[in-house]
Amino acid sequence: MRFPSIDLLRAVAIALMVTVHFVENLSGAWGEGVDFNRVGWLPAGFAAPLFTFLSGVSCSIWSDGLTRGGVSDAEIAKRTVRRGLFLFGLGIAFNVLVWLPEETFNWDILTFIGSSLLVLAACRSMPPAIPPLLAVLAVAIAPVLRALAGYADFWQLGSYEPDLTLADVGLGFLCTGYFPLFPWLVFPIAGYAVAPAIFSSGPGGASLWPAAVSASRRCGLVFGMGACLLAGGGLLILLPLPGPDGVLRRPWTMFPPTTAYVAVGLGLALTALPLIHRWLDSPGQRPLSWPLAAAGVLSRHSLSIYLLHHALHIWPLWIAGTWHGGEPTAFWQRCLPPAASLGLALVFILACVPLFAGLERRGYRGIEELMRWLCD
Amino acid sequence: MEASSRLGGKILTGSFAHGGMRYEAGAAEFYDYSDVDDDPLSTLVAELGLATVPLSGGAVMIDGRAVASLEDVGDCLGAGAASALLAFDRAAHDAMTPREFYAADEWISSDRVEPVRFDRLLERISEPAARRYVEWLIHSDLATEPQRTTCSYGLQNYLMNDPAYMGLYAIAEGNERLIEALASRISARVLLGQRVEEIGRSADERLQVRWSHAGASQTETFDVVVIALPADQLAALSFAGPVLAAALRQHLAHHSHPAHYLRITCLFEQPFWRAWLRDSFAMLDHFGGCCLYDESLRHPGAASGILGWLIGGSAAEEMAELTDQELVDAALDSLPSQLQQGRSGLIESRVHRWCSAVSAMPGGPWRLPIDRRHQPEPAEHPGLFLVGDYLFDSTLNGTLDSATHVAEWIAELAATTGRPRP
Amino acid sequence: MNLASSVAKPQHTGAAPLESPPEGLPLSARLERIAFLHTAENSSENLPPAILQFDDPPGMRAVNADAALLPGASASDNGFHLLLVPLEPPSDQPLPQAAIDWVAAKHQSPEGMLMLSLHGASLAWSPHRTAVAAGPERLPAVRLAIIEFCYREMRLRSIERGVADGRGALEADARLVFEFDDRALGQRDALSRRYQQTLAMRSQLARLMPFLQRPPLHPPTLASQIGERLRDRTRLADRADWAGGELEVRERLYEACGQRATDWTIARRQSTVEWLIVLLLAVETLLLVVDLLAAVGG
């Protein structure tokens, strides 16, 4: 079952992601001194938290739908594991084919989402109180793990540069890569935990939530948690707190994902989802029908768009670089002005809607259908 | 071996030539003790898969008017009679509880004294009208006069009208279906028309039986002989040997107290009495008190009607000498005046005489031990057993109890000694 | 389920005409509307005098609920109409056809309309309408017997309704005896409610049994004969046995469900503690592994 609220938020996340990638990969170094941590670039930082949060929400809704359809828990677990392994493998292959072989183990978002599905498969069989605790632990120990691993040693000029050793590969997967397990696990687990509260059909849809609490009250509770996280994150940013670098004191970075970043990202997701759900998902209420239809197309083909947009803007860079100087990364981050990159991103996003809508009409479902065929 | 041409004895279901409608010519009903304790007879009926119909009734028709409740007794016989009846009823209930009623056949008299007769108990009813009411109520069940039976037996026949003590039922397709169902299940050889003449001891200390069939006499020896005859027919048998003869004489002296029944059944074009007789049966104040059955209730939807008179005691003994037609006329005369016009619809009638067929004092004046009742001469003739309702309570339930006792006895002997011979 | 709670409070309104017997009956025939009310829920000052008091539940009473006094007490919900026809001698006349037709007109229940013909009285009974003809001096006692019977029969019928209503949920809940999980935990309140309802019905049935199994009166009175015959014909004892059998099954099922829910909750708590320990150990292991990898890499 698809919810317009999830489609809209996922479409926003995809749009932000495409924009970020186009601008950073095509224009990253064009404006020297561009500080990607400046306030104007803030929305770009929410794409990944929102997308991974929604992956947990979707996993929960999908597995509940299977349960209501009579599929056994064991079968659901198997399908989840298969999907996780598929995405993990696809992520590795993507790194090899798009980012070149030396980036195989950069632990990008695809490998992370695949890994998180394996964790969510285990979360299904845990007592309801354990996954939220796991999420809190993931955030709590991440700074400690980074400190132990020596996070700064793995990053050069804003890029993850590990050695191809087992230790570096392992540490990258756990805490130093682009999207390591810790603390990023907090987002899919949080999405998985709150989805039943927001999207169940009646009170008591999940045992984590009190059986007598109504749907609107549960949404209110989720919104309240999000608001508290936003406030907490804001305090972390604004108040000067003592502590070592990269731990509590550094307020806002995505790499590494500071506690304030995680708190604000999760807080935004937890406040936005129940609000938009109450606005868009009520029966009979369908405002903004064509934007929602477009969002639906983008959401349904999020994986295909992720792969396609990388291929469309990265491969020409490698080809041009190889053609002109022999170094594939010759034009990386210095190909176009930011405004042009932004424009291209917008064009790509807008073009995706009729493109994938047209392919749907012709029966083409994209790589998502391949995943379902292989894994379900 | 059965002397007559049929099995069943006093259980006889007849049928009219017109329409083949069935009626009970012998035993009218079965007694249901299952509300008090185990009832082997109703269990047996259920096991045989026989459908039953409950029988209800008990109104006494006095001068053609139904006296069916305590209020009716007061209205018809007077308030004094109602009080006297109530007092008698309470005394009867105090004298015998339902469980004591159920177990009455197992009582053994501790002393052999002549018991108080039932008429002495009835004399304590102060109101003559109430006394007559009680006599009419129980006369057909007693099948004898109150002075010829014991207090205990008389009380039982009064208390049997209380549903708390027992219920009444009949087999839907005729009581004789019980016999047919039993006969179909036994593998023994059944010989009909074989009249046993003499039983005695053989040279090898077994039992020798002499019987005749079609004029020819035969003799055979057996390990065990079970005689299932009413007391009057038992008296017609010859028992060889002084010991055995004396034992049977003693047995008969104790148990032979003949009581009599007369059954008159009439088939009419229609059941014209339904507004007057609303139950399965009622008691009439004629013939010393007789039971009138609406036999046609077991044929729901039938246009014809069947009335059956069960006359007992002295009236039955005296009237047995009358012709069938005289008996039918007497029966029809007992109907109230408002129903006399219905006699013109008489189609057929049947009369069955059961003289000396039951006991007026089942179990005798005092109760012998149960084994003693069934084994008249245990010393030299241990294989000779007697079975009969007269040893218990003159009912079919009693017959089953008696037969069960002997059968279990024989089975136990066979199991312990390897042969049925004691 | 609770007959007492389903009856509206009595109200004094403007006088409404009493209901009259159907035509074709003697002038002395009388039509009554009998209601069963609970004194705790109705102000005793406004109630008409009790015809019969019941102890099941305590405070229950039968009253003559004519329209002027109790317009809110609908006979169809918690009472019945009783048509009394005194018979002039000879009193062994059948029930007038007009009375039979009156009973049959409202006969909607599957239990069927019964016709009883005894010496001294004739009766047509259905769950909401009863007509009886008897001698005038016998009618008061007969009336009481009918009222008591109708009350008990109504109690049994409400229990049967409760049993029938619960059958759908029973089959769905049966699987929870063996397949109790987190999703089923949300039904705990509903299971508890059904168990309490089952116990309440069993309790009501147990209080009804002395009436159903009361031995017949001897010597019988006309009233006792009518009561006993009605009990037999409506098979109250058998119906009570059947209802009792179903209630026993329900009670065992919901007892088992309650036990499963409790066991599950305890097991879940234990599992949570175990997982907590696993998590903490995993964190410790993770820290050690990262430290080790960092040392190896460094």
Image (cartoon, grey):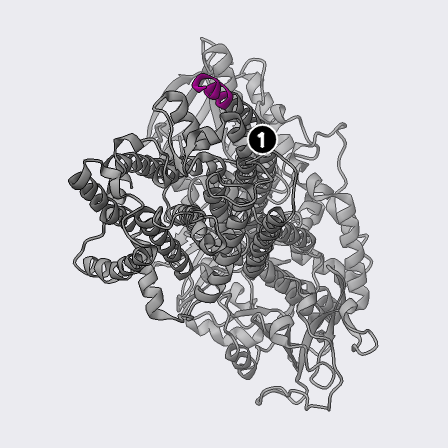
Percent position of residue B364, x then y: 66, 34
Describe residue A300's horizontal placement relative to residue A136 as left or right: left
Q: Residue at x 56, y 69 (%)?
A: C116
* Front in this rendered view, residue B412 or C282: C282
In the image, residue B99 above or below residue C122: above
Percent position of residue C289, x then y: 49, 21
Residue B284 in view (yes/no): no
Residue occupying the far front of the picture: A32
In the image, residue C40 above or below residue C24: above
Residue C295 highlighted magenta (yes or no): yes
Q: Amino acid at mark 1?
A: Leu
- Total marks placed: 1
Residue C131 highlighted magenta (yes or no): no
Q: Look at the image and give the residue range highlighted in magenta.
A: C289-298
* Front in this rendered view, residue B82 or C84: C84
Q: For label 1, count other residues whose C-alpha is less than 10 Å away and answer few (under 14), some (14-19) or many (20+).
A: some
Residue C266 in view (yes/no): yes
Describe residue B168's horizontal placement relative to residue A357 as left or right: right
Secondary structure of the magenta portion, mostly? helix
Percent position of residue A196, x then y: 49, 51
Q: Secondary structure at mark 1?
A: helix
Percent position of residue C230, x then y: 60, 63
Q: Residue at x 59, y 78 (%)?
A: C93
Q: Quadrant of the N terminus of chain A?
A: bottom left
Residue occupying the far top of the picture: B204
In the rendered image, which residue does mark 1 sit on?
C276
Image-quadrant location for residue B40: top right
Image-quadrant location for residue A327: top left
Q: Quadrant of the C terminus of chain A?
A: top left
Describe residue A323's horizontal placement relative to residue B1 as left or right: left
